[in-house]
Image: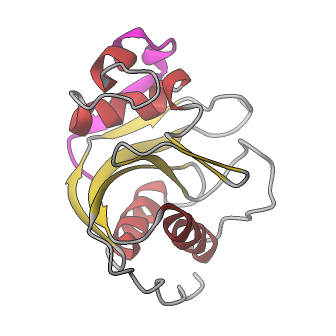
Amino acid sequence: MAELTPPPSPSSSPAVTVYLALGGNMGDRAANLAEAIRRLGEAVEIDAQSALYETAPMYVTDQPAFLNMAVRGTTRLDPAALLRFLKGIEESLGRDLGGLRFGPRPIDVDILLYADRVVTEPELEIPHPRMAERAFVLCPLADIAAGIVHPVLNRRIDALCDAVPGRETVVRIAETL
């Protein structure tokens, strides 16, 4: 595994709560998730983790099952700096950032929510634009953010989870990583 470059310097802005989705389906999936969480600690103070789920792939279905989870934490990084930091973690853990979209990967870390902010930039959309269609995101997120209201859809995460198709492809396999 490549060495992670030092995290960006946090700004002097106040810490904000973020929700991140983590997943992977290559190599030692659980070890990759654990290492990503360890590295996240360099810029995100993690204070909650969902259960661990095994999930069927979506979009590109001819690939191994994923392990997925969500975490809540606080960071002083702005959204763009947080995205750069997360991409550095992915690359350092072996992800080919130019690989097949929705294809196999050792790790994927996505920003789901950044406080209640809405960000629309060419390289970054928050809330994550496809989270409401993804059971593999909403089931873990509901473990740690059931009562949080999606800032665009104006619906609670648990209600989105209850309504999302594909819940049968998301299987809780452990209470913790």
Q: Is residue 32 magenta?
A: no
* Quadrant position of residue 170: top left
In the image, residue 108 lies at what x, y percent? 56, 54
In the image, residue 63 lies at what x, y percent? 69, 38
Which residue is at 56% across, 29% downward?
Answer: 56
Name the outermost residue toward the front. Answer: 13
In the image, residue 24 lies at what x, y percent? 54, 51
In the image, residue 119 lies at what x, y percent? 55, 47
Which residue is at 60% across, 55% downward?
Answer: 26
Q: What's the colour scheme?
A: secondary structure
147 or 140: which is nearer to us? 147
Which residue is at 35% across, 46% downward?
Answer: 70
Which residue is at 65% across, 54% downward?
Answer: 105
101 or 159: which is nearer to us? 159
Q: Quadrant of the N terminus?
A: bottom right
What number of labels is visible? 0
User: Does 12 appear above or below 143?
Assistant: below
User: Does 107 appear above or below 69?
Assistant: below
- Identify the magenta region: 162-177
Q: Is residue 164 magenta?
A: yes
19 or 53: which is nearer to us? 19
User: Does 32 appear above or below 141?
Assistant: below
77 or 103: which is nearer to us? 77
